Amino acid sequence: MKKQEENAAKWALVTGGSRGIGKAICTALAADGYHIIINFVSNVEEAEKTLEAVRAAGSDGELLRFDVSDAQACEKALASWRSAHEGETISVLVNNAGIRKDTLLLWMNPEEWHKVVSITLDGFYNVTKPLVKDMVLNRWGRIINIASLTGLKGQAGQTNYAAAKGGLIAATKALAQEVARKKVTVNAIAPGFVRTDMTDGLPEDELKKLIPMARFGEPEEIAALVSFLASEKSSYITGEVININGGLYS
Ligand code: NAD
């Protein structure tokens, strides 16, 4: 990083950071010394709790409310952050926001298709595009996209989610090649089943039988990989998709 930036706060933005995997990522990056921008859409209470966890981990942060699929909202929120933090930049971006609306394609309505695809893919574009510019100019950056096993192998009932996460993986590989020379790395993580609100209600006992490690993953196990990918230790890894699924598939 540039000399004058060495004493400035290092900022990381985590989309969908208020709960689940996003919350664990915020906490892990805070422990690594990053100041955290916790993006959330609706649940202020959960976002506040994540901020408390960030502080308990020894760092600080702030909440930034916007819907990643809303281009104007993203632009406005990021511009307001910039004007409040003149001279500072965000050097780590974790595109974690995502939803699932599972049903067979035969029954899938347009809203179920478009919402899932838009939050993942428009979300990636809306947030990454403004931030990658600063990373390129600063000649250092980390972009970590939370994809899914479904984006690699597909899953019946998740055509929308598979298309979104498969697209995110392809975008990861393309962008990685565009910015590699500027010491900006772009990687994807493909988790299997992780115990969060998203998997609440799934038949865990049945699904565990399919997993060689015979358990769901914990959000902190995903966060540990994000921490590594955000660090200097991962400097020669880019354009990769890293599976983290207890041996389910790789
Ligand atoms: P979660 O539902 O607890 O968290 C998703 C987060 O995204 C929430 O904080 C939610 O508010 C946020 N979000 C949703 N729409 C948003 C929007 N439009 N703008 C901003 N934020 C938005 O689920 P999770 O399991 O913690 O999921 C985190 C990521 O991990 C998701 O991208 C998910 O697809 C992925 N993932 C999860 C699993 C799993 O088993 N839990 C497996 C593979 C991938």
Image (cartoon, rainbow, N blue to C red):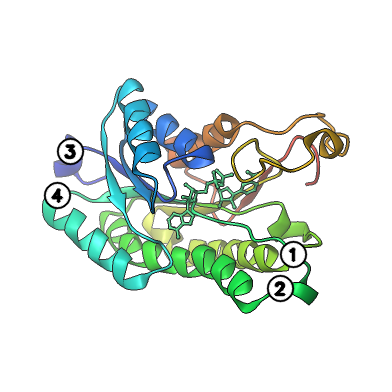
Q: Quadrant of residue 101?
A: bottom right
Please state the horizontal and vertical placement of residue 80, each as a whole percent of the image. 18, 58
Amino acid under disc 4: His
**Nearer the camera: disc 3 or disc 1:** 1
Which residue lies under the disc numbered 1?
A: 103
Amino acid under disc 2: Met
The answer to whether the residues at label 4 and label 2 have Cβ atoms under 8 Å apart is: no
Q: CA distance from mark 3 to mark 1?
A: 47 Å
Q: Is residue 177 among what the camera can see?
A: no
Q: Secondary structure at mark 1?
A: loop
Q: Left or right: 106 with respect to 134?
A: right
**Nearer the camera: disc 2 or disc 3:** 2
The answer to whether the residues at label 2 and label 1 have Cβ atoms under 8 Å apart is: yes
Residue name at image x 39 percent, y 68 percent: 126
Amino acid under disc 1: Thr
Which residue lies under the disc numbered 3?
A: 8
The front one of 87 and 35 is 35
Q: CA distance from mark 4 to mark 2?
A: 43 Å
| Location of residue 76 with respect to 224 vertically, above or below | below
- Disc with the residue nearer the chain's start (3 vs 1): 3
Name the quarter where the N terminus is drawn. top left
Please state the horizontal and vertical placement of residue 44, each as a whole percent of the image. 34, 43
Q: Quadrant of residue 48?
A: top left
Which residue lies under the disc numbered 2?
A: 108
Label 1 CB sits under 8 Å from any ligand 1 atom = no
Which residue lies under the disc numbered 4?
A: 85
Q: Is residue 214 among what the camera can see?
A: yes
Callout 4 crowding tier (Cα within 10 Å): few <14, some 14–19, many ≥20: few
Q: Secondary structure at mark 2?
A: loop
Please state the horizontal and vertical placement of residue 182, each as a whole percent of the image. 37, 58
